[in-house]
Amino acid sequence: MFLYRKKPTVAQIESRVAVAAAPAAPPSLDITSVVAGIGRQASALGKCAAEARGTIEDTTLVALRQAEVVAAQARQVQDITHAQTTIETRSRESLDAVGRARTAVEGIGQEVAAVVDTLQQVAQAASQISQIALQTRLVAFNASVEAKRAGEAGRGFGVVADAVKDLAARVEASSRNIMSTVSDLDARIGTLAGEIRARPSTEPEGRFHSALREVEGGVERIAESATQSRGICAALNARMAEVEGEMQATGRALDTALARSESLLKISETLIETVAECGVENEDTPYIRAAQQAAGQIARLLEDALRTGTISRADLFDTQYRPIAGTNPPQHLTRFVPLADRLFPQVQERLLGLNDKVVFCIAVDRNGYVATHNAKYCHPQRGDLVWDTANSRYRRIFNDRTGLASARNLRPFLLQTYRRDMGGGRFVLLKEVAAPITVGGEHWGGLRLAFQF
C-alpha cells in the first residue's frame, strides 16, 4: 500500500524559502563582550605567568649561584683532603727519619764509647810516661851526685845528668797535663755517651732519647690527627656530592617549571593576539595601533634617508657593534647611530605621551640593538652599575627572550608580557607591542612599545 503526500502549493514553497532565507535570531550572548572578556582573562593569565616566570628565573639564578658555591666548597674539601693526606705521608716519613736518627745516634754512642776507651788508653800511656820520667829523674839525680864526687873529671857528665833531670821533669809535667785533660774529656764524653746510649726499659732514659721520644710522640699525634681529619673530609665530601646532586635535580625541576610558565605565557599572548585580530576593541588595541603606526613612520624616515643618500644601505644595516671602552653595562656603536639620534626621537618621544602607562618606545635593529633610547633613559654612565642599568639604556643590545622576539618579529604585531629589570633588584611587570620595521623590502628591526598593566 503506498501513501501519497500532497504537493505544496507555490505559496507554501515561497513561504518556506522566505523563512529559510531570513536571518537567525540574535543569540542571547553578546559575542563582542565574550571576546573582550577572553582578552581580559588572557591578559590576567599573562600577568600571572610573567610573574611566575620571573620568580622561577630568580630562583634559578639563586640555585645556580648556590650550586657554584657548593661546587667550590667541594673542590676546597678535596684540596683539604689532599693536604691532609700529604701531612699524614710526611708525618710517617718524619717518624721513619726519627727512627733512623735514633739508630744513627746509638751508633754514635757506640763510637763515643770507643773514643772513651781510646782516651783511657792514652791516659794509661801518659801515666806510664810519668813513671818513666820520674825514674829518669831519679837516675839523673844519682848520676849528678856521682859526677860531683868525681870532681873535675865528672863535671861534663854532671852537666848531662842535670840536663836529663830537667828534661825528665818537663816530660813528667806534660804527662800530668795529658792525664788531667784526658780525665776531663773522659768525664765529658762519658756523660755524652750516657745521654745518647740506648738503655734497658728499667733504667731512666737519657735526655737526648727523651727528646727524640717526645718528637716521635708529637709526629704520631700529627699523623693520627691528619688521618682523622681526612676521614671527616671524606664524609663531608660525600655529603657535598649528595647536596650537589640534589641541587642539580632542583635545577632541572626549575628548568621544567620555567618551560611550563613559558608555555602559559605563550598561550596568554596568543589569546590576546587572537582577540586583537578579531577586530574587537580591548585595552591593548590603542597600543597595537600606535606601535604599527610608529613602525611605519620610522620605516619611511629610513627609506627617505636611503633615497636622499644621507646614509648607505650598508651603513644602515651595519651589525659590526664596536664596544665603548669602560662601559658597564656594555655599550656599543654602529655606523647608523648618528642617523638614529637625529631621526628616532621625534617618533619615540611622541608615543610616550600616548598615556601615563607607556614606559618606553624604542626602535631596535634585528639583533635587539638600541641606538638611541627615550631621552629619560639616555643619560651618560656614572660608574654606578645600579644607576647605569636603569638610566643609561641607549647604545645597548637587549638580546633576551623578549628583546629578540620583538626585534625579529615579522607579523603585523607581537604582544608580549614580561618583567623588566630596572637595576638594583627592582623589576616592573610590563606588556609590550612590537611591530616590524621594513626598509626597502628588507627587514631592519622592530618598534617596541612597552606599557604597564
Image (spheres, rainbow, N blue to C red):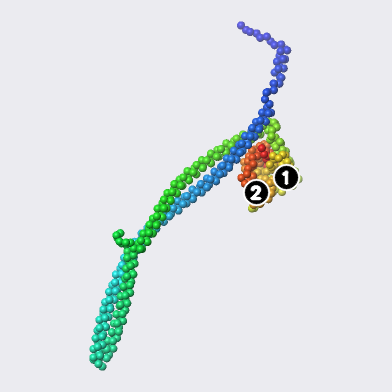
> Is any atom of residue 115 visible in this view?
no
Q: Position of residue 13 (x, y in %)?
A: 71, 14
Q: Amino acid at mark 2?
A: Trp
Looking at the image, the residue that sits furthest to the top is 1
Q: Residue at x 30, y 61 (%)?
A: 203
Q: Position of residue 12 (x, y in %)?
A: 71, 13
CA–CA distance in space, label 2 to label 1: 22 Å
The residue indicated by pointer 1 is 345
Secondary structure beneath label 2: helix
237 relative to 62 in the view: left or right: left
Q: Position of residue 336 (x, y in %)?
A: 70, 47
Instruction: Relative to 358, say whether 101 is above or below.
Output: below
Q: Quadrant of the N terminus?
A: top right
> Is any atom of residue 191 visible in this view?
yes
Instruction: Relative to 251, say whether 150 is above or below.
Output: below
Q: Residue at x 69, y 36 (%)?
A: 288
253 relative to 284 in the view: left or right: left
Of the pair 390 and 211, the residue shown nearer to us: 211
Q: Disc 2 vs disc 1: Cβ atoms closer than 8 Å?
A: no
The residue indicated by pointer 2 is 387
